[in-house]
Image (cartoon, rainbow, N blue to C red):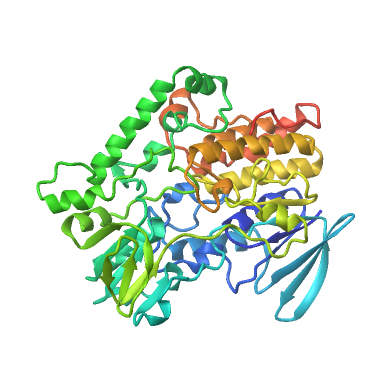
Amino acid sequence: MRIAIIGSGISGIASARVLSRFGHEVILFERASAIGGVWALAYPEVRLQNIASHYHLTDFPWPFEPELHPTGEEIRRYLQAAVDHFSLDVRLNHEVVSLAEQPDGWDLTVQSPDGERTQRFDHVVVAVGHYSADKPGALLPGLELFKGDVLTERDVRELNVFRGRRVVVVGFGKSAVDMAAFAAERGAQVHHVFREPRWLLPRHVFGVHMANVIFARASTVMIPSWVHPSRAEALLHERLPKVVSGFWKMISLVVRAQNGLHPLWRDPQVRARMRLLEPDQTVTYQMRGATALAPDSYYPSVVKGDILPYRTGVKGFSEGALLLADGREIPCDLVVLATGHSTPQFPFLPSPYREWVESEKDGAQLYRHLLHPRIPRLSFSGFNHGFLHIPAVEIATLWLAAHLRGDLTLPPPEEMERSIEKIRAWKREHTLFEPARSCGTNTRFHQYLDTLLSDLGVTPYRKRSRLAEAVVAYGAADYAGVFDDYERARAARPLPVAPLPLDT
């Protein structure tokens, strides 16, 4: 087939690699002047929260030695190396402005420096991401009066902008705590404003890197999920809920202790500041699209008073201050609004398809986090964001390629919609809201990957022994042989087959 991929972030690149292995002609269209998606927009000194062994194409290890938590620059180098290694066809400065459905595919209209051109494709993969859209602006009363600077984290291109300033950071996601830590490290007077604190995972727990804890099945099997693919896992959650809840209570106590969220501080002002950072919800409730690692200096800076937390909303601006919802004012001359992202938008899709995928406040609702049941010859890449994101994209694309080849038949649209509704209802009851909540598999990455691999007739258990399967952390390389395993599996069973009756 001739397949267009819209977007050249990591998801688009990973999908292109898999589809090209099936002999498809694949072209990636990128509206920006560089590949990388959100990494091309990243602020200085941003680092991957995962370690390097989690974040690479399964059959293309890092061609150079990155840091344990790779920098944004290292990730951009890796992505360019992958594009070059696999000779992927990436068209930069090519913005897809519209799709027109045809009986046998799609007409893509693309705007480039050479003008506008329309091309026919058999299938389209949407890989525009849900963190790289334009950031929402500051629509707060009094903004026109404020004499200081108001930025989003994406506007911060040089960290010396914080030096010697009175800084307010608004928000509590990864970008917000990074901004607060960066500013405090540069001697700024930092005030951190948020409505609700979030769980931040420590980098190390009792000297053990967090990656060796949360990427092993002994941990992931305990996570409540909308799907439990194995019978043993399902029975654990059905029959022994107190064991599961006890496990997560233990984890929360460990995380609290590691981050200093305890009442044992002698200084009452320290106790008061740290109390403001204690989350109200459980760890599992906040495990949504992403769960941030705590910057090493964030909690120590709060203890020292270099970062002052405020648990309230924002009301607006005066000439020289940020006005808080509780009536307080913070004199400042720089405000960083790190308040997250908006619901994913797809302006190139025709009506009514665009309305269908943009209609929910928590993002596009997709079967297998991959397909809309009533939009033909169109799929989504990267809308299964999780802790092992690149293997998830590759295996989902392998699942898609099996369907395109006729090996895997889809259930009727009504059945897919019932599956989507079950997942939507579960996420809304059990996980914290965010504009892309529907697009995340997050800590449920094993449950998601296991389901897709089982659909394909491939074993999801990638370790060499049962003991290693339980306690050794998974990485991207564990899925390196999946394509070949699939080819062997399809030769050994009658085709086509239907997906398993599991919701994911």
Inspect this view and state whether residue 144 appears.
yes
Question: Looking at the image, which is closer to me, 360 or 36?
Answer: 360
Residue 281 to residue 470: above or below: below
Give the residue drawn at x 65%, y 38%: 421
Quadrant location of residue 162?
Answer: bottom left
Number of marks drawn: 0
Residue 435 to residue 264: above or below: below
Residue 35: x and y in percent read 58, 67
Report the side of 425 relative to 239 (left or right).
right
Quadrant location of residue 254?
Answer: top left
Inspect this view and state whether residue 181 appears.
no
Quadrant location of residue 45?
Answer: bottom left
Looking at the figure, which quarter contains the C terminus? top right
Residue 438: x and y in percent read 58, 46
Give the residue drawn at x 88%, y 54%: 104
Report the side of 375 relative to 382 (left or right).
right
Residue 11: x and y in percent read 60, 54
Give the residue drawn at x 25%, y 42%: 258
Report the side of 438 relative to 176 (left or right).
right
Question: Looking at the image, which is closer to me, 121 or 489?
Answer: 121
Give the residue drawn at x 65%, y 30%: 502
Q: Give the farthest residue toward the right.
A: 103
Residue 427: x and y in percent read 54, 39
Question: Looking at the image, which is closer to me, 113 or 226?
Answer: 226
Report the side of 23 relative to 32 (left or right).
right
Q: Give the farthest residue toward the top.
A: 239
Q: Give the farthest residue toward the left.
A: 266
